[in-house]
Amino acid sequence: MLEELKTELERFGRENDCANSERDRRMLNITRETGEFLAVLVRATGARRILEIGTSNGYSTLWLAEVAKVTGGQVITVEFSEYKAGLAAETFMRSGLGSIISLLHEDAGQVLRRSGLSWRRPLGAVPLLRMAVPSKSNGATSCTVLRTLLSVGNSGTTPGRTL
């Protein structure tokens, strides 16, 4: 069932991205090979707490959550776009992995500032698996997230602090 859902999301992402030039409406999904690589990273490190920034329609999250289920882990994923967060929520419900995925429909910069995470060892052993920053028309989100990563990474906070 999960493989069929991944294949469906791959097809949807390709078709959607060909039909839409507006960035906010494009899925910009990772490739299957990248998903497999992320799964290897999570499995190899035994990561149990995984943070993903930029959920889109939830395709990449499925790769992370599938392995997190085996490691007894949890995935926290952040999406700014209401449209994409809605697609992701539906994906997670259909996947059977919804119980190990926490979807935050928020600005990633605010989540990071509020969390006080150390980016030397955030939420587990994998420092940062994937980061696709949602864009605002003025680019403020990208700059805010980068500044937050830098300041949190140098703040000396306790590694592994949860949201």
Image (cartoon, grey):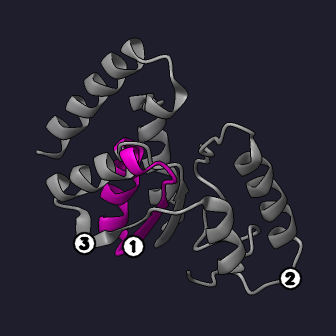
Main secondary structure type of the part rendered in magenta: helix
User: In this figure, what is the number of numbered marks?
Assistant: 3
Q: Residue 151 in the image: x percent, y percent?
A: 86, 68
Residue 64 lies in the magenta-colored region: yes
Vertical order, 60 against 149 (above or below): above
Q: Which residue is mark 2?
A: 156
* Residue on which the image places disc 3: 99
- Image quarter hosting the N terminus: top left
N-terminal of the pair, mark 2 or mark 3, is 3
Kind of residue at badge 1? Gly
Q: Nearer the viewer, mark 1 or mark 2?
A: 2
Three-letter amino acid code of the residue under disc 2 = Gly
Mark 1 neighbour density, 10 Å: few (under 14) some (14–19) many (20 or more)? many
- Which amino acid type is marked by label 3? Ser
**Does 102 sit left or right of 121 as displayed?**
left
How crowded pointer 3 is (Cα within 10 Å; few <14, some 14-19, many 20+) is rated as few
Task: State the SS at label 3.
Answer: helix
Question: Is residue 60 inside the magenta stretch?
Answer: yes
To which residue does mark 1 refer?
Answer: 73
Rendered residue at 40%/72% (across/down):
74
Farthest residue toward the front? 137
User: In 3D space, how far apart are the residues under numbered discs 3 and 1 (Cα atoms)?
Assistant: 11 Å
Q: Which quadrant does the C terminus fall into?
A: bottom right
Report x, y in % for residue 109.
68, 62
Q: Is residue 10 visible?
A: yes
Residue 6 falls left or right of residue 125: left
User: Outermost residue, left direction?
Assistant: 1
**Above or below, comparing residue 21 to residue 45 in the picture:** above
Label located before the other in sequence (3 or 1): 1
Look at 31% across and 70% down and name the residue there.
100
Disc 1 to disc 2, C-alpha distance: 25 Å
